[in-house]
Amino acid sequence: MKRIALIIFVLMLFPWAAVNAQNGIKANISDSIDVLHYDINLRLVNLSNKRISGYTDVRIVPLINGISSFRLWLQSLTIDSVRINGMAATYVAYDDTLMRIGLPVTMNITDTFTARVYYQGLPVVDGSDWGGFYFSSDSNFAYNLGVGFQSVPHNYGRVWFPCIDDFVDRATYDCYITTKNTKMAVCGGTLISGTDLGDGTKVWHWALHNSIPTYLASVAVGPYVPVNGTFNGQEGNIPTAIYVRASDTNNAKASFINLNNFLSVFETRFGPYGWERVGYVGVPFNNGAMEHVSNIAYPLACITGSLSYESLYAHELSHMWFGDLVTCATAEDMWINEGWARYCEAIGFEGIYGRPTYDATIRDLHKGVLQFAHVEDNGYRALYGIPPEYTYGTTVYDKGGDVAHTLRGYLGDTLFFPALKMYFAVHAYNHISSVEMRDYLTFITGVDLTSFFDAWVFSPGFPHFSIDSFQVSGTAPASVTVFVRQRLDHAPAYANHNILDITFMKAGQPEFTDTIHFSGAGGVKTFTVPFVPDAVILDKYDRISDALTSYSYTIKNTGLRDFLTTYCVLDVKSITDSAWVRIEHNFVPPDPMKTANPDILRLSNYRYWKVDGLFPPGFVAKGKFRYNNGLNTVNGYLDNVLMHTSQSRDSLLLLYREGPWDDWKIEPFTLYGAPAAGDLIVDTIHRGEYTLAIGTPVHFGIEQHRGQKDGGMKVYPNPSDSDFLIDWTAEDAMALQMFSADGKLSEALDLSGLQSPIRWKPGNIEAGTYVVKLYNKKQELIGQEKIIYLP
């Protein structure tokens, strides 16, 4: 399933979850019995009363000898009776969640029996409003969503039929749904018949012939008509059907125009489609979609006739492999379902629109993970073992997709995709855990993935890789020794058995790429390179999603270049030959100062930039570095610790160093923007590293470079032992404020009715260095100057 991006749920475990656990909700029922098949018979005729009624036949085989009772889940419905092979059950104990049913005779592993449960009532909707059984307010639709985000367990087959409601018990289905003649029931599998009963109702019979866990079973009732088609799959023709209102058919054809293309991409990458039908059903639910097998519940609001929601329906379609064909063993393994489906959005785009679209999708995904996953999920979390309140959180979905991309880069396409095809062929219609996935992929690829899974799946945070330095000897071919370094972004230990690309570049020469393998804090390797490189780039094509984002441009003309996801923009002023520029935004703290500088109080605790590339003679570009201490999940959560007060903006510094061997120095810059967000601009960008810092509110030699709207302010004499004359040219000047070296407001003066210049004698302040700031009527800073007061 997938939540639509604008909807954010805060999931909480309610107290009744613990009660359910005490009543056996977490008991592993599938250890003692196995359900082979469900026959679900329901009446959904009068949708206005929001009730269901009917019976389900559950065909069961014992897994142990001598059972005299068994259990099934059924959520908050009324049980009318239970019969076993036509005989009354000896007893039925029901706590509104779990049934314990007594058998008339003892059953053994050689027996098969059918339990028929008659029930009715008002089915529940999950407390998060995501999952359960829904009736539309206009009484036109009824439908289920098979997962409850808040419920524990999350599986939600139990809200509409008695079942073993976990990820591992799989069964086949026949559904017989009675509706009004004006409605149609759509379920998973193949439509066998629609029989008119002669009383204004019809019974719709659907059969699903391959086994699924209960949360993937489905029903939707509404005024549906099919938009039919055929997909020519690897194992033959497969019918496709999108069930919508008659008024939506043209939009459905347009929005799903690439459906067969996505299917072809996924079959090429993962192997044959494993189900008897490809299906979607439109439902009036606006918060996301649900991957019911061959009958994906899809928001009618997203069937617009445009391609705006292709990522949504591609995500759900990919679940027919990731999650439906092979299902996660537990909720703690949910990244196997949802993380891989998130990744498949990029795979689908790559196949249809090309590699640049794939790269852009992964780049945006990765930036969001590094910047916001720990905010939205209340901490840095491992993919495996995620707490139940975050089963469907950002870590599982987005970091899961990020790690799938990283595994592809780690193995390479020649191992990665064939391994996935074998994975699905061997594990089809079964479940798998994270450990089992690791072990199988290790077996089939011949690459030991223990260290990879330890670092990327079983641990929180991220590794961060960088080139510390390189040394060159010889000419062509040259011997180049590269030193690489690993740091940690909230990870508990260094990643081991890392495999990273190193790309060597020189103007006019084809690039040369080789790999380095290393473990721990760092590694070193000497490469034989066909030329003397001008630049050495680690993971140039971002195959490994470590703790940085990057963007590169080949630049041939002047103008603005936005280095996407890096919070950096270049304004190219002069260029005589082609330049290649790469900017990295690193989500780890910069190295500390080598030598203390009293004008630099603290460096960013969170990030720094690296500028690299091939800069030809005559290449001149301004660099714009973004600061942001906002609390929003669009561009915020970057400098909240560094800029911890509203006055922090006025103490911002931009630091530069050539590389790890160098020390940080204050770089002249111009400051534009508001207290929460803005830019620090340097006149000429250089190869090297940049970071933000907090310094004294007025730093020597920097103020003349600060370029808020020019108020033309001058202060003289300076230094002064008595009065200061303050002159300004701005017509909208409104106020002057004086701040001490530690950023405290010392004096303020309202300029209303005053004309420039004025004489200002400081009051009861001590000798020292201060900064005078000039503000306009909009409370914008339009000028400032350092002053020295020596009374």
Image (cartoon, helix red, strand yellow):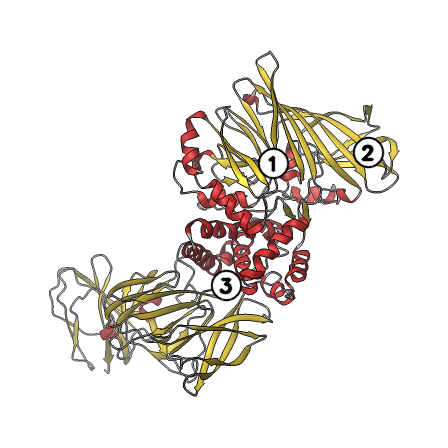
10 Å crowding of disc 1: few (<14), some (14-19), many (20+): some
Q: Looking at numbered disc 1 in the image, what kind of residue is underneath it? A: Glu
Residue position marked by numbered label 3 in the rendering: 545
Q: CA distance from mark 1 to mark 2?
A: 27 Å
Alpha-carbon neighbours of circle 3 within 10 Å: few (<14), some, or many (≥20)? many
Q: Which residue is tagged 2?
A: 112
Q: CA distance from mark 2 to mark 3?
A: 50 Å
- Disc with the residue nearer the chain's start (1 vs 3): 1
The answer to whether residue 744 shows anywhere in this view is: no
Q: Is residue 88 above or below residue 607?
A: above
Observer-nearest residue: 127 or 90?
90
Residue located at (45% from left, 77% from top): 591
Residue 225, percent from left and from top: 49, 26
Q: Which mark is residue 577?
A: none
Left or right of 769 on screen, residue 290: right
Residue 790, horizontal then vertical, whole percent: 24, 83
Coordinates of residue 788 in the picture (x, y in percent):
24, 80
Q: Is residue 354 left or right of residue 651?
A: right
Indicate which disc, 2 or 3, sits on the residue closer to the N terminus.
2
Q: Secondary structure at mark 2?
A: loop
Residue 629: % across, % down: 39, 61
Nearer mark to the viewer, of 1 and 3: 1
Q: Which residue is mark 1?
A: 276
Nearer the observer, 617 or 529: 529
Q: Is residue 769 above or below residue 637?
A: below
Give the spatial CA distance, label 1 vs label 3.
36 Å
CB within 8 Å, label 2 to label 3: no
Q: Amino acid at mark 3?
A: Ser
Q: Is residue 9 above or below residue 107?
A: below
Using the image as rendered, state which of residue 244 and residue 330 is in the foreground.
244
Mark positioned earlier in the residue sequence (1 or 2): 2
Numbered disc 1: secondary structure: loop
